[in-house]
């Protein structure tokens, strides 16, 4: 469920839920959503019972700058010490913060939820949304998190731009390793050919992937403008190719090398 992130605490490491990035919550919640998820993920590990305040005291002696101090710290969409252009234009930073709060508040109100003001308020919303569970046991309070986090799309009325961005991020996370495997074959084994006659079955055998995986990788390359797929002289829909069908894969390596890294950075920062 989680990966350990080492931190100089006296007893345990912080743990981050593996599904956090794919779920898209970091693009919906205030900045403290990320460290709050780490705190709850750590509380969910075997061997800990108690409140989040207890855990905060155990690891950070009650004060964690990343979460804004403690659980009663105010939520923000911008860190006070964030570097960048907003340092020189505080009015832009304030306007951005106000705009994010307006959209966030409207979204929660439309869904019938209170708008959280503190990290503690947000932790209670985690329980409401099913991002976390809290149970009182004879040994004390036990926290847990589901193996797969519920998606914000299923719980909140996201605006069209945000929903589209989350779809793109999830698609990139899903297809990234598949594209890497296909490109490694094209570069390392075939020497960056401009064009090859092949099939999904052949590429699957060469990359050690399933035909469906190769189909998704091709679809991503086509959508990004890095490749074209043709059958005969006509363009073909990569997502509709049958596993055995022969097709021509035409690569645009100049476009790939110029834009692939930039695309990855843009998606990560979206």
Image (spheres, grey):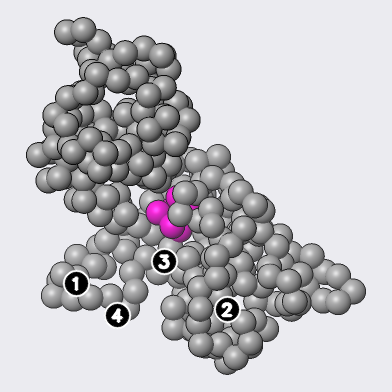
Q: Which disc, if any, is residue 13? A: 2
Q: Are marks 3 and 4 in contact (CB under 8 Å)?
A: no
Q: Dot 1: few (<14), some (14–19), or many (≥20) neighbours within 10 Å?
A: few
Q: Which residue carries the number 3 mark? A: 31
The residue positioned 45% from the left and 35% from the top of the image is 209
Q: Residue furthest front?
A: 189
Taking the spot 17% from the left edge, 8% from the top edge, the residue there is 233
**In this rendering, would 29 be left or right of 203?**
right
| 232 is within the stretch colored magenta | no
Q: Which mark is residue 84?
A: 1
Q: What SS does tag 2 mark?
A: loop
Q: Which residue is mark 4?
A: 81
Tell me the quadrant of the picture where the N terminus can be found: bottom right
Q: Are marks 3 and 1 in contact (CB under 8 Å)?
A: no
Crowd band around label 3 with a 10 angstrom C-alpha radius: few (<14), some (14–19), many (20+): some
Specify the segment rendered in magenta.
Answer: 24-29
């Amino acid at each position: 469920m989680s990966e350990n992130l080492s931190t100089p605490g006296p007893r345990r490491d912080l743990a981050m839920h593996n599904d956090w990035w794919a779920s898209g919550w970091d693009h919906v919640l205030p900045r403290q959503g990320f460290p709050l998820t780490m705190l709850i993920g750590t509380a969910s590990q075997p061997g800990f019972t108690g409140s989040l305040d207890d855990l905060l005291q155990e690891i950070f002696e009650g004060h964690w700058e990343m979460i804004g101090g403690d659980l009663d710290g105010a939520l923000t969409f911008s860190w006070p010490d964030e570097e960048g252009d907003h340092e020189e234009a505080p009015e832009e930073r304030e306007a951005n913060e106000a705009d994010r709060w307006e959209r966030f508040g409207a979204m929660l109100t439309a869904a019938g939820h209170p708008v959280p003001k503190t990290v503690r308020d947000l932790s209670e919303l985690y329980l409401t949304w099913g991002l976390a569970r809290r149970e009182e046991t004879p040994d004390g309070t036990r926290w847990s998190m589901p193996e797969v986090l519920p998606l914000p799309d299923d719980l909140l009325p996201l605006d069209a731009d945000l929903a589209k961005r989350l779809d793109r991020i999830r698609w990139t996370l899903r297809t990234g390793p598949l594209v890497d495997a296909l490109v490694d074959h094209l570069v390392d084994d075939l020497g960056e050919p401009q064009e090859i006659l092949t099939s999904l079955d052949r590429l699957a055998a060469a990359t050690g992937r399933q035909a469906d995986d190769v189909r998704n990788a091709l679809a991503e390359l086509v959508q990004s403008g890095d490749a074209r797929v043709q059958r005969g002289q006509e363009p073909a829909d990569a997502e509709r190719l049958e596993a055995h069908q022969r097709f021509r894969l035409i690569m645009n390596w100049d476009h790939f090398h110029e834009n692939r890294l930039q695309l990855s950075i843009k998606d990560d920062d979206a």
